[in-house]
Amino acid sequence: MDDILIVLNHQTNIPPFMLTALRYAKHKYDKVYYINTKYPHFADVFLEDNIIVFLQPTNKGRIIAKLKAFFRMFYKSTVKNIMRCISNKGLNFGYIKTFGVGLAADACIRPIADKIIKKHSEDKITVLSTWLAFCAYSAACLKKEHKHIKAVSMAHSYEILVSRNPLIPYHFMDFKHKYLDGIYFIADTMRTFYLDGIGKITPAYRKKMFVCHLGSYKAFSVMNKTEPHLFNICTCSRMIPLKRLEVLANALADWNKGKIRWTHIGDGPLMDELREKAQAIMSKNPLVEIVFKGFVPNKEVELYYASNPVDIFINLSTIEGLPISIMEAISYGIPIIATDVGGTKEIVCKEVGMLLPQNITTQLVLKSIEDFYLRPQNEQQQMRSSAYNYWKSNFDATNNIKKLFSLINNL
């Protein structure tokens, strides 16, 4: 009897946490099938592997899936969910559109998984959904149809925070709770948020909800270094409003200590606006240098930490799950300034850096940076060592992924 893992996803890329999971899974399972709506970015790193197989529907299959999704909008179970949503939240065409897109994704990936399950009918099969979204609905449907398989899902942030999206309870959540064998939240805080937001959940369903920190994989063994006479801060995110990069920019406009450089990794819709603001700040304040690197592939982000000095990594988000960007930074011994949102406090303790309240001000951010800047060199170095040690003990993905698959195996 072989061990088979079937991964369900509906993104156009393989998220970093799944890259780490696949690196481990290829040694644990006899065959891994990664099913996506389209051939995902970053899949090429596994091209030489004979264990991992990437599957996606053909163009004809995608057209058929869209037709199926249209007709399934009129199924009794679908209509029931939509009517319950309308009854409680009012008519929302955005919700109906999202529901239709989700059904189309399910219609793309579930038939492929169903064929694999039938092909390996004598083997031990685990179906893993990468998010508690419609791929988790697919996993639950497969479990209902094939009782002998294990069907589990990971749960992160955007797809579980009812405070962020009050329509989440109307995305077949009761069905997922019933048929999934396990749901693995990336942070204890996120599990609490979900339970508080989703409403009444039976004790039997609660027992299937676990917490397992994902962690990050450290590609380079070196530690980050510092640079004399230039204080370096770094951010890494999409350039979107909820990341509040403009608050950091405004704080640096008032910087009056030594020379400081802010490097931002990532792009997004606010890039032009922030670039213009940065030019204005640098023209008025010669102590400040601001560099926007744009989009950088994940491995090159780590290469940046391995090769370039960073004294502080900053995350001012209004919403987070358990930020992998922070995990990656502390794995190279970089201290953190971050807002206390989502599961961030499960990473940023006093050994790692400084937590700020969610409702930050420009002056508070400026003072926090100054606090790090003015610390004696030996204190800064001690915090760098503490940050790395905290990552090694709690967020080393090599260990945490083993724990996740061990929990799944013991179901």
Image (tube, rainbow, N blue to C red):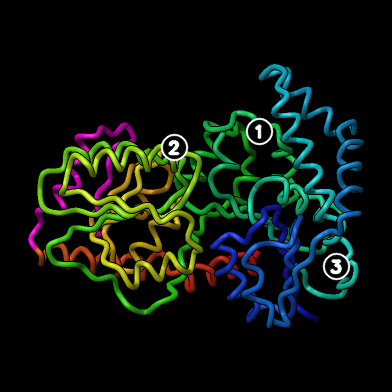
* Most foreground residue, 116 or 185: 116
Structural distance between the alpha carbons of marks 3 and 2: 40 Å
First-in-chain label (3 vs 2): 3
Q: Is residue 169 magenta?
A: no
Q: What amino acid is at disc 3?
A: Ile
| Label 3: few (<14), some (14–19) or many (≥20) C-alpha neighbours in 10 Å | some
Q: What amino acid is at disc 2?
A: Leu
Element type at mark 1: helix
Q: From where the camera sits, is residue 344 visible?
A: yes
Q: Position of residue 382 (x, y in %)?
A: 17, 67
First-in-chain label (1 vs 3): 3
Circles 3 and 2, Cβ within 8 Å, touching? The answer is no
Residue marked by disc 2: 242
Residue marked by disc 1: 169
| Label 2: few (<14), some (14–19) or many (≥20) C-alpha neighbours in 10 Å | few
In the rendered structure, find residue 116 and report the number of the disc placed on it.
3
| Relative side of 322 to 100, left or right | left
Report the span colored magenta: 351-376
Q: Position of residue 304 (x, y in %)?
A: 37, 67
* Most foreground residue, 168 or 204: 168
* Most foreground residue, 267 or 345: 267
Residue at the spot 28% in from the left edge and 34% down from the top edge: 360
